[in-house]
Image (cartoon, rainbow, N blue to C red):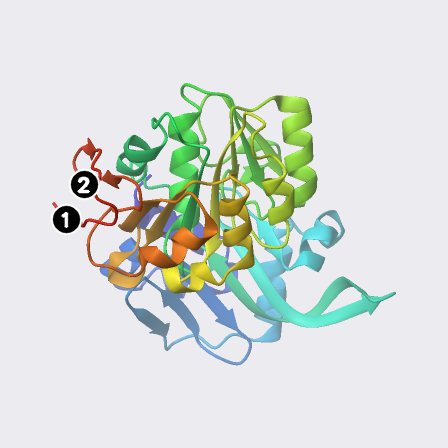
Amino acid sequence: MNERARFYEATALLPPFANALQNVPAHIAENACEIRIRAGRPVVVETPSERYVCRETNASGEDIHKCVKFFCDYSLYSRERELAEGRITLKGGHRAGFTGTALMRGGELTALRDISSVNLRIAAEHKGIAEKLMSLTVFERDLRGLLLLGAPMSAKTTMLRDLARLISAFARTSVIDENGEIAAMYNGVPQNDVGLNCDVLDMFPKAEGIMRAVRLMSPEYLICDEVGGEYRALAEQAGKGVKMILSAHCGDMCEAACNAAVRTLVSSGAVNYIALLGCGSEIGNVKGLWRVNDAEDIGGCGNSSDLYRCGSRIIGNAEKKVRTAPLSPVAAG
């Protein structure tokens, strides 16, 4: 399915606005990544580089409620947990996120009411996007783990999804899909292609999913998106024969050097390769790739325009090369 078809598939999930969204310019439909609906305001379609406002729309609270009911197949109770968490994965791999008024019980958020905003993220697979990155890292004999870094909207999840598809063609792979964005399971079936030998732990809290995957599924590779507070559970797997493919929010290597999760994953040995992804006009592009041996190496990577360099070896753009001079730049090819 091409990107324009995915956009129109997503608009069908928004009955009050489906007709208006059919009329957006073709180049917006082809590049759309999000549809944002906010009470009392027009619907907005976001692309990586542009924001299109549907001036003829004005979302009401009732319109938003109709959309939410449609997401839940008109059974709000059946999706109660997901509604409380503010996210629902939909058929086709699209994902809706919500904001509204929190209902608290015993200090815990138990439900959302008066939903005021919906962000429908349009599924996109982009098969092949990870082929070069995989060739430069996954087949390295010394690979312990790869960490993808990037700001929001830098295609980290898209890159992980394609890595899952490619890696699971030859190795047992487990995906911890806490947010339902990598495989996009719907009624137990992945809506996205995650490959032949891939087991998906859908909506599991990451720490619990990591433990279950290692204990029950004996993966050779473990893939996990948006690493945060559970980084210690991942660090504990270092040296246990599981290679990790992870992502984390960091806009540049300076931020990475100060990030506790990144530093712990590197210093524990769970990760020894770091890739930095671009955003905006560079979305999905690998801006830099480094091999790191210790957390202190991260700061030395810097934000050079030289593509693919590292402390103890240099990884060339078109082919892998081993050189003795540390931090010598390789011209981008």
Q: Is mark 2 on a helix, strand or loop?
A: loop
Placement of 202 over or under 306, stated as above or below? above
Residue 227, percent from left and from top? 55, 50
Q: Is residue 3 visible?
A: yes
Residue depicted at 20% across the width and 37% down the height: 323
Residue position marked by numbered label 2 in the rendering: 317
- Which of the image's four quarters has the C terminus? top left
Residue position marked by numbered label 1 in the rendering: 332
Identify the mark nearer the N-term, 1 or 2. Answer: 2
Q: Check contact, mark 1 vs mark 2: CB within 8 A.
A: yes
Q: Which image quarter: residue 208?
A: top right
Horizontal arrangement in the rendering, residue 97 relative to residue 21 (left or right): right
Asked whether 99 or 38 is in front, the reply is 99
Q: What element carries label 1?
A: loop
Q: Which amino acid does label 1 sit on?
A: Ala
Residue depicted at 32% across the width and 41% down the height: 126
Q: Which image quarter: residue 199?
A: top right
